[in-house]
Image (spheres, rainbow, N blue to C red):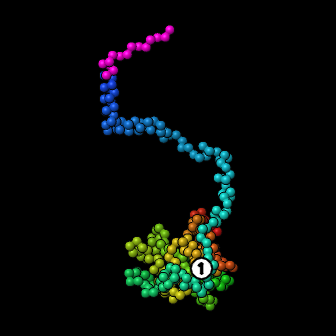
Amino acid sequence: MKQEPPPSPPLHHRHHRKRRVALVLKKFTKPTAYFILLLLSFFLGYLSAPSSSSKKPTLTSRIPLETIPATLNSAASVPVADHNSFSIQCVDPVNSEKVRQTVLDRVFHGKSPWQNFPPAHVSTLLRQNRIRGWGSTGAVFENLIRRVRPRTIIEVGTFLGASALHMTKLTRQLGLKTQILCIDDFRGWPGFLDKFKDIKMVNGDVLLMYQFMQNVFYANATESVLFMPFSTGSALDKLCEWGVFAELIEVDAGHDFHSAWTDINKAYKILRPGGVIFGHDYFTSADNKGVRRAG
């Protein structure tokens, strides 16, 4: 037998209940309600957070290594073309006689950077001749210059110009008219001023480039040595676009793997047929022997 529904509450009870609901809703529209909601969210988040004593999950514990596709687990699966693809396309090489003027026009508006050198604001801060390098007079320089007899040499990483000036001396002794292009941003590295305290700084600008220029000026090599004060990557790209190639290229800039690898590959693009590319710091331990791995 179907039971009859309970009788409805009296009308005045229903009105009283509506007033209480309206009163609660009215209270929750005030800022207090937002505060209560914030506390509630924090409390629920605290309850759902993992215990500090629980073990932190790792990738290997959640995803077995054997289930990872070989294409994600093997560098050999990546197409070699992806690594060796560079967007910059080189133009045909300019004649060796035009290399110096090409760089002067593109970088220095056709004028020698040694005009009116040194500028007044740094003249008292430079040493007459401040040469410092590492392995800058090794036998490899003379051996390669005698073998290649280069018309153009590009040095990737210059610092104070020790090896560039040594190569200038060697080419003069062999009766070669060789143009040497030095690529360096002349910023040094963080902390290098702790070791080279005599290199001055003016308004945050270390004077490496000016001291390099002074060294070249002192050696009377301003017609044989020219420089590009930019990052190695951007300078090598521009030489490629301008058609400035070399028979001999020395790579001696960043010692980490990625920097050395990029410099080597970009420099190789502007190496003339029959030329030689060589480097420095092959045995350095930096970045887990980064230069050796890049070579």
Q: Which residue of the protein is positioned furthest toward the bottom in this rendering?
A: 175
Q: Going by the image, does 61 lie left or right of 45?
A: right
Let me know if residue 196 appears in the view.
yes
Q: Which residues are magenta?
A: 1-15
Q: SS of the residue at dot 1?
A: loop
Residue 55: percent from left, percent from top: 54, 42
Q: Which residue is mark 1?
A: 244
Q: Nearer the viewer, residue 251 or 69?
A: 69
Q: Quadrant of residue 93?
A: bottom right
Residue beneath the point at 32% across and 38% down: 31
Helix, strand or loop for the magenta stretch, by majority: loop
Residue beneath the point at 42% across and 76% down: 200
Three-letter code for the amino acid on which mark 1 is drawn: Val
Crowding around mark 1 (Cα neighbors within 10 Å: few <14, some 14 to 19, many 20+) is: many
Residue beneath the point at 58% across and 83% down: 99
Q: Is residue 14 magenta?
A: yes
